[in-house]
Image: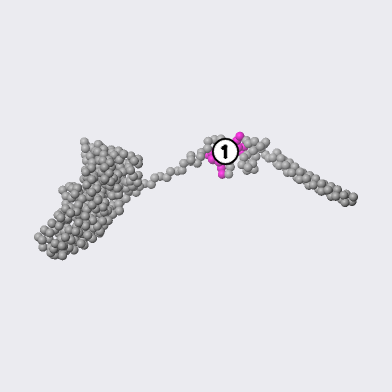
Amino acid sequence: MSSTWFLFVVIAVVVLVALLVTGLLVARKRRISLDAQREVEEKPKGGSYAASGGIALAPGGEAPEHPVEDRPETDGQPAVGDDAAVPRDSAQRTVRDVKLPEEPAPTPVVEEIEPATGRMERLRGRLSKSRSVFGSSLLGLLGAGDLDEDSWQDVEDTLLMADLGAATTNQIVERLRDELSRRAIRSSAEAREVLHEVLTAQLSTDSERAVRALPHIVDGKKQPAVVLVAGVNGTGKTTTTGKLARVLVAQEKTVVLGAADTFRAAAADQLQTWAERVGAEVVRGKEGADPAAVAFDAVKRGVDTGVDAVLVDTAGRLHTKTGLMDELGKVKRVVEKQAKVDEVLLVLDATTGQNGLMQARVFAEVIDVTGIVLTKLDGTAKGGIVFQVQRELGVPVKLVGLGEGPDDLAPFEPGAFVDALLG
């Protein structure tokens, strides 16, 4: 009986303790709630932006229509750390609407250009590869005194290896035999003099060697000279066009460049760079535009602005592609509706040798080539291509490229060229 009574007492104590703890917790929670309600009721009208978690609340928990408190501002701009005075429902600019200040385009710097006169003399050192064939081998053979048939065969082989071609080589050998015998040559110096005369005479031509880039007067109005630059891919047409512009500018001529190579976007950009370096203007079209239309626009621009010359860079094309070659003929025909074409310069890579000569023949059939530009002449031991291309086409070499520098395009001078070959 006593144990049962003791169990009831323990249970009663546990129940009383539980009720006491529960009452304390409920009382504490009610006190916290009352304190929070009193704090809200005592808050001043308008509230605080920071205390309300970023939204200013009016009594009763409703947001006011406009900010209650005036904020300092200058020219409609909010002060740092304060609310904007501009209503929040006004139009807002996005990041895309904000335009950054545009930097002025840099003014292209026109470069100083070397005088075109005498460039062959200054660049003769670039022909060291060709000189190794002509200078060392040929002069060594001719300066040995009386030559037997084997020695003359060596002379002939040396000329053939230099890409002079069979017909040109036969003419030179016959002339050398006659001169050496008639003058009784016995020294290398005398042999060099004879060889210089024979080679220079072989390069002579009745055709005008200067590039025709002077304006005409037509019906009392100045008309620019028009020069088309053609050739296969990779020969250096665009670079040649830019370098030729430098030559003309150095001679105080005004120039417009036509970017008619519309199949290669880089060609127009490259020509633009060349033009900026000399202060010339470029006429270009969209990528893939009709090359004849771009050429026409370039010539028209040249006529309207009264420049001295218009240089048109045409697209590179394989000489075996009939369609592309016909298109080149179209470019010339369309341009001639605006002005006469004074020059058609065919750009050949001197390092291609006989293949370059085959290209020249096809181009000459499609378009009336008036002059040859031989590029990369400093990179070949076959400088004789100059002799052969003139003989085969009956067209003079007018310009030669002797390096990658901007002023490494030189007007061709036969005497200076032979001097460079012989050393």
Which residue of the protein is positioned furthest toward the left in this rendering?
Answer: 182
Look at the magenta stretch and give its main secondary structure: loop
Res. 125 image quadrant: bottom left
Does residue 84 sit above or below 143 in this rendering? above
Does residue 133 sit above or below 309 in this rendering? below
Q: Residue at x 30, y 53 (%)?
A: 404
Whether residue 66 appears in magenta in the rendering, the answer is yes
Q: Along the line of sight, which residue is nearer the eye, 92 or 377?
A: 377
Whether residue 367 appears in magenta in the rendering, the answer is no
x and y percentages locating residue 112 in the rendered image: 30, 51
Does residue 297 sit above or below 161 in this rendering? above
Q: Which residues are magenta?
A: 65-80
x and y percentages locating residue 207 in the rendered image: 17, 47
Q: Residue at x 18, y 61 (%)?
A: 154
Which residue of the protein is positioned furthest toward the right in this rendering?
Answer: 1
x and y percentages locating residue 250 in the rendered image: 27, 49
Q: Residue at x 18, y 63 (%)?
A: 140
